[in-house]
Amino acid sequence: MHITVRKATTADAEVACIVLRRSITECCAEDHRNELEALSAWLQNKTPENIAGWFAAPENFPVVATSGEQVIGVGLLTAKGELALCYVHPEVRFKGVGKSLLNAMESHAMQSGLTEIRLSSTGTAKTFYLRQGFTFSGASEIEFGIRAFPLTKHLPISPSRRATISGHTPILIKALSPFTRAANWPLIVDSTAPNMAPIIT
C-alpha cells in the first residue's frame, strides 16, 4: 500500500476524529472489553473541536497518514516528547501505517533536539512499541478504566545536530530522514511491511 505522511492541519480534524474513535472502539476491545463506561471515558475528549485545538497548538507536531485521498492514520507528538496520539484506521491494520506515523514523529523529535519520546501504551499496542525499540519505564497504571503501560524510546542525535554540536555546518542533507521537511510537505513512504501491528495509544 502506498502511504503518504504529512503534517496535519485543523481541516483534518473531523476525519481524524473518525479515525481515532473507530480505532479505539474496534481495535482496542482487548483494553476496554466493550464496557460502555470505560469506552465512553476514553472517547469523551475525542471530538473534532478538541482535535482541531490540538492540531493548531504551536507546541504540537500533528501528522496524518493518507492513502490516495483517504486519511488512514493520525499521530501527535508534543514539544516535550510525549507521543499523545498514534492511531490507525481499523481497515488498514497490519499494513505499516502506524510505523510510518511513528517514523515521522521520531524524525521530527530528533531534529527538534529531543533525546527520547514517551507514551502510555495500551495492552493492544505495547508489543508493537517494544518491537520498535521502546522499553518499559515504570509500572502499569489505570487510566480511564484502561491499563496503560509507560514506555520510553531513547533517540540518536540527528546528523545535522551532531554536526552542529561538533562545531561544523551540516551540509550532508541527504543523510537526514526524508521526514524532515518544511511545514508544507507531503512525505512519501512506501510501506509494504507484512504483519505490522497497529499503534494505538
Image (cartoon, grey):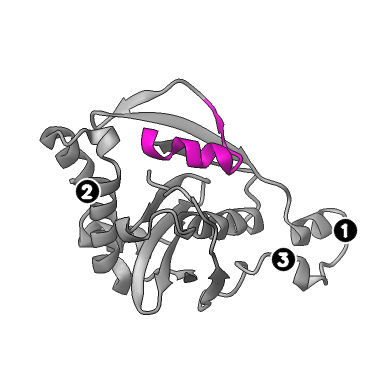
139 with respect to 104 (left or right): left
| Predominant SS along the magenta part | helix
Magenta span covers which residues? 123-137
How far apart are labels 2 and 1 at the CA level?
A: 45 Å
| Residue shown at 35% from the left, 79% from the top | 69
Helix, strand or loop status at disc 3: loop
Residue 79 image offset from top left, x and y in percent: 51, 51
N-term mark: 2 or 1 = 2
Helix, strand or loop status at disc 1: loop
Q: Which residue is mark 3?
A: 176
Q: Nearer the viewer, residue 195 or 188?
A: 195
Dot label at residue 167? 1
**Tag 3–tag 1 contact (CB < 8 Å):** no
Q: Which residue is mark 2?
A: 45
In the rendered view, would you say 177 is above or below 44? below
Classify mark 1: residues with Cα within 10 Å, few (<14), some (14-19) or many (20+): few
